[in-house]
Image: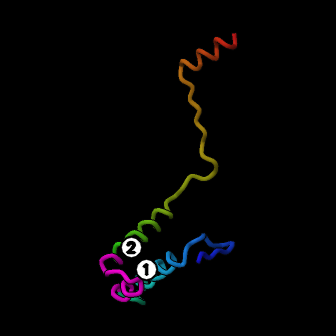
Amino acid sequence: EIEHNEDAIWFSDFARLRMRTVVDVLSGTLSVQDAAARLAVSPQYFDQLRAEALAAGVAALEPKLVGRPPVVRVLCDEMLRHQLRVMG
């Protein structure tokens, strides 16, 4: 099931459980072994999931440009010459 409210982004229950489990391990309330058992994965695979979750989180926090992206229009010389010929 997918949950949504006005202040949240859409995530599946599956993804939410994985993130909650990663957060529980990071906060020290759950061991890696218990986290792996909760998700029915190996401890090694849980470590991979944790690393991917942290990398995605850090990437999401990178500064981004604000506003609309600039539109770059490039006319090659041939197109410009053609337009000048057409105009007169």
Q: Image point 53% across, 23% down: which residue?
A: 76
Q: Image point 50% across, 75% down: which residue?
A: 15
Highlighted magenta segment, given as a residue range: 32-46
Residue 25 against residue 9 in the figure, above or below = below
Q: Amino acid at mark 1?
A: Val
Q: Image point 66% across, 72% down: which residue?
A: 7
Of mark 1 and mark 2, the one earlier in the sequence is 1
Residue named by callout 2: 49
Q: Say which mark, if any, is on residue 14.
A: none
The quarter of the image holding the N terminus is bottom right
Residue 88 against residue 66 in the figure, above or below = above
Residue named by callout 1: 22
In the image, 80 versus 12, the foreground residue is 12
Could you tell me if the residues under marks 1 and 2 are in contact, i.e. CB atoms within 8 Å? yes
Q: Quadrant of residue 72?
A: top right
Q: Is residue 8 left or right of residue 22?
A: right
Q: Quadrant of residue 78?
A: top right
Q: Quadrant of residue 21?
A: bottom left
Residue 16 against residue 33 in the figure, above or below = above
In the image, 60 versus 9, the foreground residue is 9
Does dot 1 land on a helix, a strand or a loop? helix
Distance from disc 1 to disc 2, alpha carbons, whole Å, reads 8 Å
Residue 17 point in image, percent of width and height: 49, 81
Residue 24 point in image, percent of width and height: 44, 85
- Determine crowd level at label 2: few under 14, some 14-19, many 20+ residues with C-alpha closer than 10 A: some
Q: How is the image coloured?
A: rainbow
Residue 36 point in image, percent of width and height: 36, 84
Q: Is residue 14 left or right of residue 8?
A: left
